[in-house]
């Protein structure tokens, strides 16, 4: 007699888990893509960007409910690598046709740890009819502010410029004064050292930043947590002539009509971007890298560039990316990346509230930066009790 065992019940693989920091519009586009895409099922979760570094670091450190693919800010990469929480990228990632600005985001040392997904940084968005002076890119931060102030004086807007009360927005002011956020020789380094002149440069930058708010040149800071909603509202309502923001905000600034806005460089601006990484604790790393490749395919990047104004990471995407993406890339070309160090992103935890206190008039630049230097020294392990 010959007997056949019954066929085993089919086993459905658990879905691929993708944790991301996309904004509302990009999340909608992602969901549309995944709904139409074949292949493994993908379960997505969104973490607010402002909480992303802490949440993602804690999650990967615990190893519990580990995602397979994570979208992170490039400044978080060195810290996650140092903590041993990421898997190196496959060899074919390094061989892809990335633009130079994107390739620099994905490496730590000589190793590729990520797939670059988008290039971003600070730029100035404006309406050409409101600020015609910016038809030529400004050669200095003072020139940018002067152009915005001229529009305010003409009555074209209530406020000349929109700035966020956040340390990332302070970077151009620091650089204009000759300082850098994480340079131990300039008084704002994590070690807290620096010459008297360098310390003064940091205080000069903070004072210049806060003075714009005190004089009504900059619009009042939006309430904490409401920036992504309030800043586009002010710009669409014509309350600010120029808004300093990133390509991540262009869709909301224009209500989806990217042709309604022009962008130009912010002298001294920081440049960064977003990358896709696979944690060491990922259940399905091969499928995760395949999804990362799909999310950075040139055709998809070109489509998202036309829709959102994002700067593609692949050179082959620019042929179909549209005019705005090219303008954004040009605006970000002179921008300089922040220092590539595990502590760099952590420095803003202390700088942000200190800057907010100066803008609110609750502290002087000297008082605020003294506290920042002490906090950064503790972060470095050099502080005395």
Image (cartoon, grey):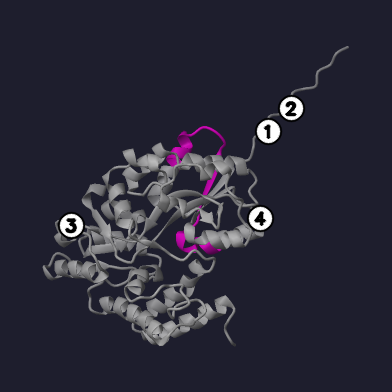
Location of residue 186 in the rendering, given as x and y in whole percent from the top left corner:
42, 79
- Which label belongs to residue 11? 1
| Front label number (3 vs 1) | 3
Q: Mark 3 points at which residue?
A: 135
Q: How far apart are marks 3 and 1 (CA)?
A: 60 Å
Q: Distance between the residues labelled 3 and 2?
A: 68 Å
In the image, residue 53 lies in the stretch drawn in magenta: yes
- Residue shown at the point (32%, 38%) measured from the top left: 319
**Of the image marks 3 and 2, the number of the one nearer the N terminus:** 2
136 over 94 or under it: above or below? below
- Residue shown at the point (45%, 82%) measured from the top left: 194
Q: How many marks?
A: 4
Q: Name the residue under label 2.
A: 8
Does the image show residue 165? no
What is the span of residues highlighted in magenta in the rendered image?
31-54
| Front label number (4 vs 3) | 3
Q: How far apart are marks 4 and 1 (CA)?
A: 23 Å
**Of the image marks 2 and 4, the number of the one nearer the N terminus:** 2
The part of the image, by quadrant, that contains residue 30 is: top left
Q: Mark 4 points at which residue?
A: 64
Q: Are marks 4 and 1 in contact (CB under 8 Å)?
A: no
317 over 243 or under it: above or below? above
Q: Do the residues labelled 2 and 1 touch (CB within 8 Å)?
A: yes
| Front label number (4 vs 1) | 4
Location of residue 321 in the rendering, given as x and y in whole percent from the top left corner:
32, 42
Per the image, label 3 sits on a secondary structure element best described as helix
In the image, residue 277 lies in the stretch drawn in magenta: no
């Amino acid at each position: 007699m010959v007997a056949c065992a019954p066929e085993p019940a089919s086993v459905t693989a658990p879905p691929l888990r993708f944790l991301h920091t996309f904004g509302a519009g990009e999340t909608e586009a992602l969901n549309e893509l995944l709904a139409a895409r074949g292949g493994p099922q993908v379960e997505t979760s969104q973490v607010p960007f402002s909480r992303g570094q802490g949440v993602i670091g804690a999650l990967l450190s615990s190893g519990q409910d580990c995602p397979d693919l994570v979208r992170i800010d490039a400044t978080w990469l060195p810290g996650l690598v140092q903590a041993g929480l990421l898997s190196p990228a496959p060899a074919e990632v390094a061989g892809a046709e990335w633009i130079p600005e994107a390739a620099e985001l994905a490496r730590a040392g000589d190793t590729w740890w990520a797939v670059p997904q988008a290039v971003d940084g600070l730029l100035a968005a404006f309406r050409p009819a409101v600020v015609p002076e910016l038809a030529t890119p400004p050669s200095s931060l003072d020139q940018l502010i002067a152009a915005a102030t001229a529009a305010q004086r003409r009555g074209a807007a209530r406020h000349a410029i929109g700035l966020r009360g956040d340390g990332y927005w302070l970077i151009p002011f620091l650089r204009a004064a000759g300082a850098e956020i994480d340079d131990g020789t300039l008084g704002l380094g994590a070690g807290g050292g620096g010459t008297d002149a360098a310390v003064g440069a940091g205080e000069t930058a903070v004072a210049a930043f806060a003075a714009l708010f005190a004089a009504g040149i900059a619009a009042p800071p939006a309430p904490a947590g409401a920036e992504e909603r309030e800043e586009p509202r002010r710009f669409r309502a014509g309350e600010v002539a120029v808004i300093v923001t990133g390509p991540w905000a262009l869709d909301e600034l224009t209500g989806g009509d990217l042709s309604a806005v022009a962008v130009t460089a912010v002298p001294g601006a920081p440049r960064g971007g977003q990358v896709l990484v696979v944690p060491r604790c990922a259940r399905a790393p091969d499928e995760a890298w395949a999804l990362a490749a799909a999310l950075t395919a040139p055709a998809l990047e070109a489509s998202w560039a036309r829709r959102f104004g994002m700067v593609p990471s692949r050179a082959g995407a620019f042929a179909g990316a549209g005019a705005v993406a090219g303008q954004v890339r040009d605006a970000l070309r002179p921008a300089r990346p922040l220092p590539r160090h595990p502590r760099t992103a952590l420095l803003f935890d202390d700088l942000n509230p200190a800057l907010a206190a100066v803008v609110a008039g609750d502290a002087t630049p000297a008082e605020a930066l003294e506290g920042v230097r002490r906090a950064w020294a503790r972060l470095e392990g050099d502080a005395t009790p």
